[in-house]
Image (tube, rainbow, N blue to C red):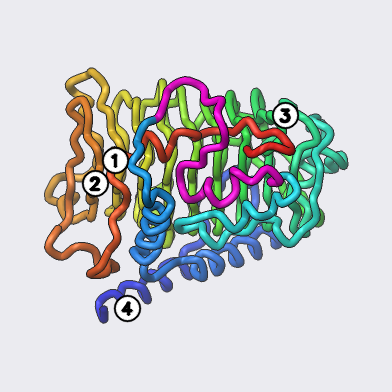
Amino acid sequence: MAGFRVEFLMLLVSVAVILPTLRAGIAEYDEYLLQKAEEAKMASLEAFHSDPMNVTDHFNLQVHLALEGSNSTRRSMKKYNGPCMATNPIDRCWRCDPNWANNRKKLATCVLGFGRKTRGGVKGKIYVVTDPSDADVVNPKPGTLRYGAVQKKPLWIIFGRSMIITLSKELLVASHKTIDARGANVHIAFGAGISIQFAKNVIIHGLHIHHIIVATGGLIRDSTNHVGLRTNSDGDGVSIFGSTNIWLDHLSMSNCADGLIDAIQGSTAITISNSHFTHHNDVMLFGASDSYQGDSVMQVTVAFNHFGKGLVQRMPRCRWGFFHVVNNDYTHWLMYAIGGSQHPTIISQGNRFIAPPNPAAKQITNRNYATEAVWKTWTWRSEGDLMMNGAYFVQSGNPSKRRPYSRHDMIKAKPGTFVRRLTRFSGSLNCFVGRPC
């Protein structure tokens, strides 16, 4: 324990002294952005959990309670048209309530994992998006998504109807926002993506995000009192930069110019859940640089997601931090599923891995830019995973030492045989007001 305290103090010092090294589309750091960067670093330290295994244990307990008394693991691949059937603890918290539309903010109490304290815009008013246009990024029009996203006050953003929003420039989401697409079929497509930068407490739920392109930079509003000069956006579906307490849930994502989801620059306290990912190369990147030690605070839960057709690699690709990959369904990859560099801790629990036919791609794991003499000390553990079609996970770290944060009575995740049930309703849901979702 004394050794851990020393390591934790060194972590605090390293994060405090490292200035932002990745620009993330920022052409220049003015006084406002420098202050936001400092606030973001302090928020990351506050959100960092010194005992991450307590978080993973709590998550796994909730899975056990949700499935207690049920031994069904069946998941039909056909579209489900029956009564509401919430199959994991996050969904059971809210989905089968026929009055969900009158109690939208209950969603904020349902998140588990490292992002469990995220409440989004729960303290704010409901803001309704009625206009899918995005013509003015400096003075956005009331009724548009961009207008709501940049407000300083908390807001719970919903959509008045189904729509396709083609963002002309990246959408910068301010702190204390929920973007809640339930009850409408909302696509962010054929334009720029969503950026959460130097922000905290953001929920994004129920969107289709696809065909995101690299968009030109320029002056873009990121707050009611600030317009910043931006470079070209990278083409990420969702970019999380220097931000904390983020929950991404029930997203359907594919075909972005860069990553589907990137979390970098000291971002932490993140949960990515119940989402469906298809047709993409670099799926998730957690930590963008082997030289940026500030990502040591990164703690991410990846749970109940379906990694589906047309995916190649990075599900996720990790650096530096602590990553709990639990009860996900990996039905497709071309190169590898989970990778990393710079000694990340990766705990894989209760996932189902179905390897591709290619004999050279059966290995789930990939250590980047490290010899075995180096990576054999990294803690990468597989517990209760279901390996199919020749899939195999190369573990590392000393199993007798376990993890410095573990408890003797650690509760294990549900085994991989339950995954088809837990992930059955991944992706954006077809919700109708007045009916269970």
Work out whether residue 379 can be spotted: yes
| Number of the label disc, if any, that sits on residue 180 | none
Q: Mark 3 points at which residue?
A: 165
Q: Residue at x 36, y 26 (%)?
A: 312
Identity of the residue furthest to the bottom in this view: 2
Amino acid at the residue labelled 3: Ile
Q: Which of 390 and 24 is in front in this view?
A: 390
The answer for how far apart the CA atoms under marks 2 and 1 are is 6 Å
**For mark 4, does the 10 Å Cα neighbourhood hold few (<14), some (14 to 19), or many (20 or more) residues?**
few
Mark 1 element type = helix
Q: Earlier in the sequence, mark 2 or mark 3?
A: 3
Image location (x, y in percent) of residue 253: 53, 30
Mark 3 element type = strand
Q: Mark 4 points at which residue?
A: 5
Give the left or right position of residue 101, taking residue 42 as reference.
right
The answer for how far apart the CA atoms under marks 1 and 4 are is 35 Å
